[in-house]
Image (cartoon, rainbow, N blue to C red):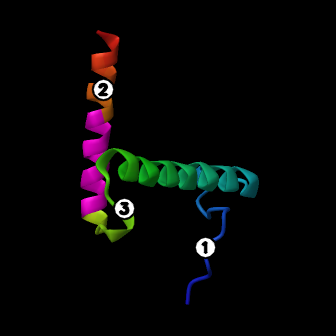
């Protein structure tokens, strides 16, 4: 039976301190929350009702929408 993963990885090239790992996890979860809020606001869908594949597809669509909006605002 394998040990439970910890913030410090076992490979020397990927050693991350617990503080850095916590920071990275916070950034990642913040990005997820922001993305889910954006899906609700822009696409009017509940991200929690989507499968992982559907969620990923909607995120790509949202990124495209935001890029197109930026193009329009720059004109």
Q: Looking at the image, which residue sits at the far bottom?
A: 1
Circle 3: is it few (<14), some (14-19), or many (20+) Cα within 10 Å? many
Asked whether the residues under the numbered discs 2 and 3 touch, taking CB atoms below 8 Å apart as contact, a structural biologist would say no
The residue at which mark 2 appears reads as 69
Does residue 26 appear anywhere in the picture? Answer: yes
Mark 3 falls on what kind of element?
A: helix
Name the quadrant containing residue 54.
bottom left
Using the image as rendered, state which of residue 72 and residue 26 is in the foreground.
72
Q: Which stretch appears magenta?
A: 54-65
Q: Is residue 42 above or below residue 40?
A: above
Could you tell me residue 39's position as x and y percent? 36, 51
The residue at which mark 1 appears reads as 5
Q: Is residue 29 above or below residue 62?
A: below
Q: CA distance from mark 3 to mark 1?
A: 28 Å
In this rendering, position of residue 49 left or right of residue 23? left
Using the image as rendered, state which of residue 39 and residue 56 is in the foreground.
39
Residue 61: give its label: none
Q: Quadrant of the C terminus?
A: top left
Q: Quadrant of the N terminus?
A: bottom right
Q: Earlier in the sequence, mark 1 or mark 2?
A: 1
Instruction: Look at 67% across and 62% down and name the residue there.
Output: 8
Residue 47: give its label: 3
Q: Earlier in the sequence, mark 3 or mark 1?
A: 1
Using the image as rendered, state which of residue 38 and residue 30 is in the foreground.
38
In this rendering, position of residue 27 left or right of residue 36? right
Q: Is residue 38 above or below residue 22?
A: above
Circle 1: is it few (<14), some (14-19), or many (20+) Cα within 10 Å? few
């Amino acid at each position: 039976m394998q040990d439970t993963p910890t913030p410090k990885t076992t490979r020397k090239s990927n050693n991350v301190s617990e503080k850095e790992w916590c920071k990275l996890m916070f950034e990642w979860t913040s990005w997820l929350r922001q993305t889910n809020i954006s899906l609700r606001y822009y696409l009017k869908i509940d991200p929690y009702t989507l499968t992982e594949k559907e969620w990923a597809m909607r995120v790509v669509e949202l990124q495209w929408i935001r890029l197109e909006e930026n193009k329009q605002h720059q004109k």
